[in-house]
Amino acid sequence: MQIQILNISVQTLNWFDNKIVDWCSAGKIYTLNGETKQLNKYHFGYKFDSAINSADGQYVFLFERLGTKGLLIKNGEILREINRSYYMADVYDYPAAFINYNDKVYLAHCPVSYRQLDFEHVESGEIVTNTQNREPSDIFHSRLEVSNSGKYLMSKGWVWHPIDVINVFEIKDCFLNPNLLDKLDYNFPDSGSEICTASFINDTKILAGSSAEVIDDEKILNLPSQSFAIWNIIDNTFSNQATPEFDFGNLFSINETLCWDIYKFPKIIDLTTGLIIDKAENIYSGEQKSSILFDNDKQPQVAFDKHRKRLAIKQKDKVVIVTRE
């Protein structure tokens, strides 16, 4: 594991084009060799603490992680404000992701209701999936993630008890039939335990991790509690199960045999054995184990570079880059 420290202070933390970018601060770019550049003209003074960007960086969505307010930006200029429901917004991650469909960019989020996942055309503002006869399941969508190919969208949210759940949606199908976004059992893992973390490996396989909560005793062998495994979304089966002897939180897939875990400190886990093969205990990376958060101040911003499989972790006046080699 290699560690690089950038002595910089950022408001929002993202990877873009092999560089660190603070989109809230006029798109300020920090290269890993110490150079800086500013992409845009305007800084945004609101308490935004999170951002996502489209693949080409043309569109940016700034938002408050445990708030209701968001701001949609195009090339540094405001397109419009975005809002989500107030209901429980202060305790779980804001659901948002950019998706591409038929050469157009959409924002996946929940503008109509906390439980209704929608696709909004970024340029026009049209919520194209807000059709009649929508009957969404009572789920708090959160921690949205798009597969590398852009084929699937995953929601890592929760339902009332509270219990964390994950759902996977084929994006094309949902454009053709928005009612598919309402089905809680649409590509839903057949697990007997609560799935609190997940990460795309590829278009057919997802790394899934469970908490100590048991939901169905008869299915618990599919994914035991406090374990992780690879979920095949095509045939709804689990493989490569491992039950580690340590607590884990948010997992980020590296490949089919390795992943990052950022519970308390960054570490690399061998999925075949459940053992930690490298770690950096001197870097605090938060204690998130769910989409539900009660104290965002204790959770440092973490940005995962899904292309190069590395982490950027915000500390007080610096950003720490952690790579495998």
Image (tube, helix red, strand yellow):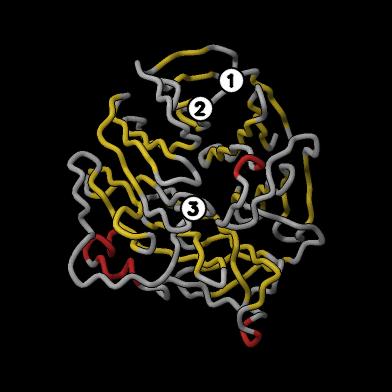
Image quadrant holding the N terminus, namely: top right
Q: Can you give x and y, in whole percent of width and height, for residue 101 in the image?
A: 26, 50
Instruction: Name the image quarter holding residue 26.
Output: top left
Q: Is residue 295 above or below residue 305?
A: below
N-terminal label among 3 and 2: 2
How busy is the neighbourhood of tag 3: few (under 14 within 10 Å), some, or many (20 plus)? some
Whole-angstrom CA distance, mark 3 to mark 2, is: 23 Å
Q: Secondary structure at mark 1?
A: loop
Q: Secondary structure at mark 2?
A: loop
Q: Is residue 270 above or below residue 166?
A: above
Look at label 1 and name its amino acid.
Leu
Instruction: Name the image quarter holding residue 82.
Output: top left
> Position of 256 compared to 30: left or right?
right
At x 51%, y 39%, the residue is: 307
At x 19%, y 64%, the residue is: 131
> Position of 126 compared to 274: left or right?
left
Look at label 2 and name its amino acid.
Asn
Q: Which mark is residue 86?
A: none
Residue located beneath label 1 in the image: 32
Residue located beneath label 3 in the image: 143
